[in-house]
Image (tube, rainbow, N blue to C red):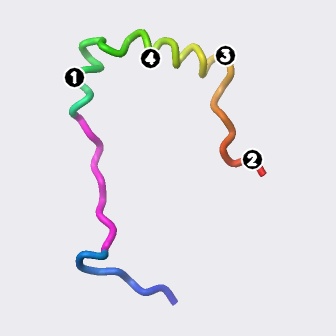
Amino acid sequence: MEKKLSGPFRPKLKKADKSLDELLDKGYFKEKIEALEHIVKTYGLPKFDKE
């Protein structure tokens, strides 16, 4: 049986970090994002769950 954790041992939920959104809107990372999109379109995403 699993024991339910409570109090300080309970896992904490993390929220999405919105502080980088304004940097993306300003286009600071535009070149890197375009390069990454090209790589993903060309080669696809890696298969992490291969056995």
Classed neighbour count for the residue bearing mark 4: other residues with Cα under 10 Å, few (<14), some (14–19), many (≥20) = few
- Disc 1, SS: helix
Asked if the residue under mark 1 is in contact with the one under mark 3, i.e. CB atoms within 8 Å, the reply is no
Residue projecting furthest to the right: 51
Note whether 24 is above or below 13 in the view shown: above
Question: Which contiguous range is marked in magenta?
Answer: 10-18
- Disc 4, SS: helix
Where residue 18 sits in the image (x, y, percent)?
A: 23, 35
Label 2 – label 4 distance at C-alpha: 27 Å
* Res 42 label: 3
- Sequence-wise, which precedes: disc 1 or disc 4? 1
**Mark 4 — residue?**
33
- Sequence-wise, which precedes: disc 4 or disc 3? 4
Where residue 14 sits in the image (x, y, percent)?
A: 30, 53
**Circle 2: residue type:** Lys
- Disc 3, SS: helix
Q: Is residue 35 left or right of residue 24?
A: right
Residue drawn at x 38%, y 83% as measured from the top left: 4
Where residue 21 sits in the image (x, y, percent)?
A: 26, 27
- Sequence-wise, which precedes: disc 2 or disc 4? 4
**Mark 1 — residue?**
22
Asked if the residue under mark 4 is in contact with the one under mark 2, i.e. CB atoms within 8 Å, the reply is no
**Mark 2 — residue?**
50
